[in-house]
Image (cartoon, grey):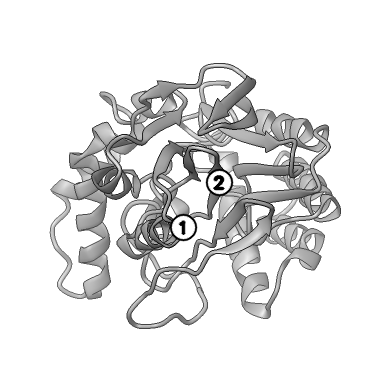
Amino acid sequence: MKILSLFLSVALLQTAAPSTPVAPPAREIAPDTFLLPGAMLPDRGPDGNTVILRGSSGLIVIDTGRHPWHSDGILAFAKSRNQPIAAILNTHWHLDHSSGNRRVKAVYPQAKVYTTTAVDRAIGPGGFLTRNAAAARERKPDPKAPPTAQEETALFLATMDAAETLKADVTVERSGPMTLAGRPLAMHVTTDAVTDSDLWLYDEATRVAVIGDLVTLPAPFFETACPARWQSALDEVWATPFSLAVPGHGAPMSREAFDTYRKAFGNFRSCVGSDKEPAACAEGWTNDVGSLLVSDGDRRQATDYAAYYVGFLRKGGGVSADCRDK
């Protein structure tokens, strides 16, 4: 599941995609607020959503995706606006949200990375990314694997070779107001949720919340998660008077849509903690978020992901192996 698609590649009943991926187009979702949508393409790891905010002294890029064509979209947007990228904000260290840092910083070296210290642990001795990189380097090539598998592995290892670009230039350690590129924002730091420290933000001027992988569709990705604290983080977002929430994967959400997801997450956690069959929990998840799923393919993916994560979480006593809050 995402533990593979984060770093290597796996086909997961994903929708058809062009043979040669292209940079995503940007669209304005609120004043001076633009979305470059991520994607899940066959035989490739995903790219998370990117949000770009326009400030008085430059652009603020929130999450940079994984693949070169995604960061090409970010760079093309900056060029079209004739504005420099002044800041990069990573909501968390998963590489589908931060691999593009090195390509963006190569063009805009003055852009500072704002994120939490969780990435230092992920790339440190014994960390999640360090372990996966070691496994990837030791794995013998599979002659039956599609060419994209080699490309995905090479991209992962190239990112790890440039791991310094994943680290914060400015560490965000606690919640509070912060002005980036002349634009005032409210930063929120959540511990032991999706990762051991996640960052999300609220823009009072537009009432937009950018929440990273606190919401992912078609299902939550639990590889590094502490689900109980994640539920609390969703409640914290709900308490914010946003009108639009941008998830890490999926379309921007109204308050009603976000609340649907929030309640479905709680129901899924309860089911995982019960003795119900994984299929029943998966069916419950898919039904609960049915209004948020666009196609039959989305529903199949949601069910498959959810069924997998029931076993994954039960094996770990309700949390991932990397959750510190056990």
- Does residue 94 appear left or right of residue 49 in this picture? left
Q: Is residue 235 left or right of residue 38?
A: right
The residue identified by callout 2 is 54
Q: Nearer the viewer, residue 266 or 40?
A: 40
Q: What residue is rendered at 68% in x and 78% in y?
A: 295
Q: Quadrant of residue 313?
A: top right
Q: Residue furthest right?
A: 256
Q: Are marks 2 and 1 in contact (CB under 8 Å)?
A: yes
As helix, strand or loop, the secondary structure at mark 2 comes to strand
Q: Residue at x 62, y 49 (%)?
A: 310
**Sequence-earlier tag: 2 or 1:** 2
Q: Position of residue 34 (x, y in %)?
A: 59, 56
Above or below, 207 against 250 in this view is above
Three-letter residue code for mark 1 = Arg
For residue 81, which numbered disc appears in the image?
A: 1
Which quadrant would residue 134 be assigned to in this image? top left
Q: Quadrant of residue 285?
A: bottom right
Measured as percent of width and height from the top left, residue 239 is found at 83, 32
Q: Nearer the viewer, residue 139 or 158?
A: 158
Secondary structure beneath disc 1? helix
Does the image show residue 249? yes
Q: Residue at x 38, y 62 (%)?
A: 76
Question: Label 2 amino acid?
Answer: Arg
- Residue 213, percent from left and from top: 58, 45
Quarter placement of the C terminus: top right
Residue 218 visible in the snapshot: no
